[in-house]
Image: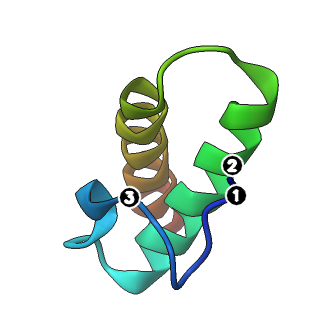
Amino acid sequence: MKWTIENFPMEMQALPAIVREKAIEIANRMKKEKSVNELAIVEEAIRQAEEWFLNKEK
């Protein structure tokens, strides 16, 4: 199942909207590319989205 702005993992709930949107995008891409469990995908997507946001601010 593809995650959306309305339907995403609860681990992403506390993220700012812009970071959550990027994390959803990354997680959906990772789900297509990798065969690891969803929790690992969510954690990595959040990490990458937060890094993306911090780099965006520079």
- SS of the residue under disc 2: helix
Check disc 1: other Cα within 10 Å, few if <14, some if 14-19, many if 20+. few
Residue 2 at x, y percent in the picture: 70, 58
Give the numbered dot on residue 2: 1
- SS of the residue under disc 1: loop
Residue 44 at x, y percent in the picture: 43, 32
Above or below: residue 57 compared with residue 9: below
Q: Residue furthest front?
A: 1
Residue 31 in view of the camera = yes
Name the residue that disc number 3 marks.
9
Name the residue that disc number 2 marks.
28
Q: Are marks 2 and 1 in contact (CB under 8 Å)?
A: yes
Instruction: Please indicate whether residue 51 sits to the left or right of residue 28 in the image.
Output: left
Residue 42 at x, y percent in the picture: 42, 41
Can you tell which quarter of the image residue 25 is in? bottom right
- SS of the residue under disc 3: loop
Which of the two labelled residues, at mark 3 and mark 2, occupies the earlier sequence position?
3
Which of the two labelled residues, at mark 1 and mark 3, occupies the earlier sequence position?
1
